[in-house]
Amino acid sequence: VKTIAVGTGKALVMGEQGEADVLLVHAPSSEKKLVDEGIVTNYQLIMHNDFIIVGPPEDPAGIRGKSDVKEVFQNIAEKEALFVSRGDDSGTHKKELSVWQACNIEPEGAWYQEAGAGMGDTLGIAAEKKCYTLTDRATYLALKENLGLDVLSEGDPLLLNIYHVMQVNEEKFDKVNGEGAKAFVDFWVTDETQNLIGEFGKDKYGEPLFFPDAGRDPAELGL
């Protein structure tokens, strides 16, 4: 398997252009277009974790303990508290933008900064500048010892981070390895792999980094 690690936005573009055999991504609303157009097939729910809002312990926007992410974003915007966005069209960036949109807020001004970087680098910038950011929990747990950032808001259903795997349609793109893509998708939904997902991270972080979802009704996750 040749892995190309890019943000979800770029991965979906690669799928649209037939430049990948299989996609593993986490932006269901953006994925739907490819499913509806038949660009991808064998679309499978495989796992989820969640997004959280982290920031400096001083918490200048006063969001600590608030679970309503729209209220949290409104507070940050009203206080013009420093917020760093990934700004890279990744699944995380898409999620963040969807929350601002749900708040009817167009984030702009000196308080809102775009990193144009991956999650690890964005967390590093947030730590350096003592500002807020939205991150997936797994990356935060992996890096938190060196960040000095606290989890300030979590638990809103809007912050579920849902992963699907799918084949790029070999009938639309001659170069797609349909057999290999199917084998890859099948691997992710086996009981063995799903059990591994549920255990991954427990030994190091005391909690799993992902929760297995293969075979689960998508409606249970709000899809």
Image: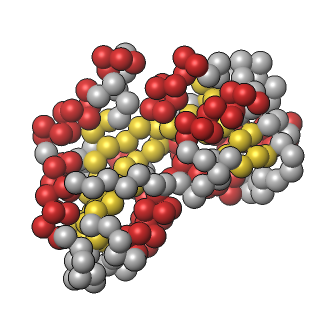
Q: Nearer the viewer, residue 123 or 197?
A: 123
Residue drawn at x 60%, y 38% as measured from the top left: 121
> In the figure, 52 relative to 20: above or below?
above
Which quadrant of the figure contains the N terminus? Answer: bottom left
Q: Position of residue 151 (x, y in %)?
A: 60, 24
Determine if residue 65 is in view. no
Q: Position of residue 187 (x, y in %)?
A: 16, 49
- The total of numbered circles placed on residues is 0
Q: Position of residue 189 (x, y in %)?
A: 18, 48
Which quadrant of the figure contains the C terminus? Answer: bottom left
Determine if residue 206 is in view. yes
Q: Quadrant of residue 23?
A: bottom left
Q: Is residue 20 left or right of residue 118?
A: left
Q: Quadrant of residue 192?
A: top left
Colouring method of the image: secondary structure
Residue drawn at x 45%, y 55% as measured from the top left: 6
Q: Nearer the viewer, residue 72 or 129?
A: 129
Q: Position of residue 205 (x, y in %)?
A: 39, 18
Residue drawn at x 19%, y 70% as measured from the top left: 177
Residue drawn at x 35%, y 35% as measured from the top left: 210
Residue sitting farthest toward the front: 2
Q: Is residue 71 left or right of residue 45?
A: right
> In the figure, 158 relative to 127: above or below?
below
